[in-house]
Image (cartoon, rainbow, N blue to C red):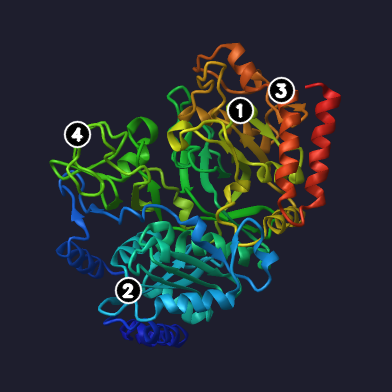
Amino acid sequence: MGENQATIPLEKICDVVTEWVNSVATLVQPEHIHWCDGSMEEKRIIESQMIARGELIKLNQETFPDCFLARSHPNDVARTEHQTFVCTRDKELAGSNNNWMSPDSAHELMRGLFSGCMQGRTLYVIPYRLGPLSSPYARCGVEITDSPYVVLNMRIMTRMGTDALRRITIDGKFVKGLHSTGDLNSERRYIIHYPEETLVESFGSGYGGNALLAKKCHALRIASWQAREEGWLAEHMLIMGVQNPAGEVRYIAAAFPSACGKTNLAMLTPPTSMPGWKVFTVGDDIAWLHVGDDGRLWAINPEAGYFGVVPGTNRDTNKNAFDMIHAGTIFTNVALTADDEPWWQGRKKNQPIKDWMGNDYVDGAVAAHANSRFTVSASRNPVQSAESNNPMGVPISAIVFGGRRAALAPLVCEAFDWDHGVLMGASLASETTAAATGTTGIVRRDPMAMKPFCGYNLSDYWRHWLKIGRNLKSPPKLFHVNWFRRDTKGHYLWPGFGENLRVIQWMLDRSENRAAATASAIGWMPRVADLNLQGLELEASIMEQLLSVNQSEWLQEIVELREYFKQQDRFPAELELQLQSIETRLVSNNQ
């Protein structure tokens, strides 16, 4: 490549990318081709073009500098899971957890949709890197799209541009992503994954989860397939660092289904009654975990930004997130105030005059869409960890699974061993809330919070987790938490938010053999005296409820879990043995 590489046009650097781009261009027939370099000049030009076309609205630059509002089509506001497919030669490899289509059928379908779809449009070539550029664990990809909105978001969410393309030249491989918004016809909307070809094709949507192919499509579905083949884990997990008053920093990876406070936990603000404690965010959504030379589990965050749900974000619920989105942010499907500020449910200032579709706001109507989003660079986070760009990642002391259960699950429970912890993750579930579905208490299973994102058979995925544990000399401890237990009147028993740090303290102290626990039928649990409750006024009876295990409820849970696991092909015998052990302990301990 030589010293003058920086002066070489992007499309001349990497022949393998150029060849693919040319073949796609022949199919989609764009008017122009633009190779993205990730520069600030490029960003400004694309923003100006979108503003001129009415596709982007500049927000109040005094109160929200470098912030913009984008609106998507009303039928295109969320991931399209029922039209998301994993296409493997062998259907069983995809598993019953994924929609399946044969690769030949999928290619034929998508060729028909993509044929001529970019006529009159610009084809953007987006080379990107997931993970720190110098990390041996980072991976490259190239997304081809006709959406400038995707370009601007990918610039924030990935390490996008010239450096990534040069890295592809060195590596000689990359994940291919082809995307077009098409005509936004929901009947012609498909998100297709070909894990054996490291290829993703997406047509008919401009929404982030369907169109930002580096995110769920590459960083989870394709990466999880690669991780199984190569001996690592691609997980739907936050990564956070916790510093105690002695200055020790330890790291947690945690998986939560939606509506369980994942982003809030990643950016937790310690309560004032715990002076000297600090929390740092490494990542809020995705973790790539590798077995280090020291036999420990190490994690990197492949992303460079946040693509978060904005409703409910304020100084009380997540001060760090609220502060960071006041500059350099793309808002999608929020409402607009008279002074050109973004507005969403939970924002405690001003009132909307335009709803998320651009219509005049009517009092009492929905202003911002429930799934409205913010996209912002991780560098904007006031508590972003300095280790976020460490090429080797951070060592994980604890892995946490958390769900929303009103009665069953205690506040915290530690697995007896790695296999038991894998069962905890495989059993992960949350109960629906009235706000989300109109009904309450319906249990939705979401193993490891990966059900929508695992790129292959879930039973094989659990078996891979078991194998990873065998390769660890010093495995992290595994835990389950439940911030959402309620009393008989429906009131939350645990205050949550920053107070969750008290539970984290116990988990991390357990990882260092510094904290006591007692054995229950479902795992190791703290006594009330084992938790740091200083400054927290909770009655002893409430803590007893939070840490109680109801025998009959758990025996029924075992029955329901067996029914769920029967739906999965090739369910690992090791996990069935763990179920049997819990059942035996429940009966014998008379919990």
Pointer 1 with pointer 4, Cβ within 8 A: no
- Is tag 4's residue or tag 2's residue first in the polypeptide sequence? 2
**Residue that mark 1 sits on:** 411
Q: Nearer the viewer, residue 174 or 181?
A: 181
> What percent of the width, then of the height, locates residue 553?
71, 26
Q: Where is residue 412 in the image (x, y as percent from the top left)?
A: 63, 30
**Looking at the rendering, in which quadrant would you find the N terminus?**
bottom left
Give the residue type at disc 3.
Asn
- Give yes or no for contact between labels 4 and 3 (Cβ–Cβ under 8 Å): no
Calculate the distance from the C-alpha at mark 3 to the C-alpha at mark 2: 58 Å
Q: Mark 3 points at which residue?
A: 550
| Three-letter amino acid code of the residue under disc 1 | Leu
Q: How far apart are marks 1 and 4 (CA)?
A: 37 Å
Q: How crowded is mark 4: few (under 14 residues within 10 Å), some or many (20 or more)?
A: few
Q: Which of the 4 image quadrants contains residue 362? A: top left
Q: Which of the marked residues, 1 or 4, is nearer the chain's N terminus?
A: 4
Nearer the viewer's eye, disc 3 or disc 2? 3
Q: Position of residue 397 (x, y in %)?
A: 63, 44
Quarter holding the C terminus is top right
Q: Residue furthest front?
A: 187
**Disc number placed over residue 350 in the picture, else none:** 4
Residue at horizontal 68 percent and vertical 25 percent from the top:
526
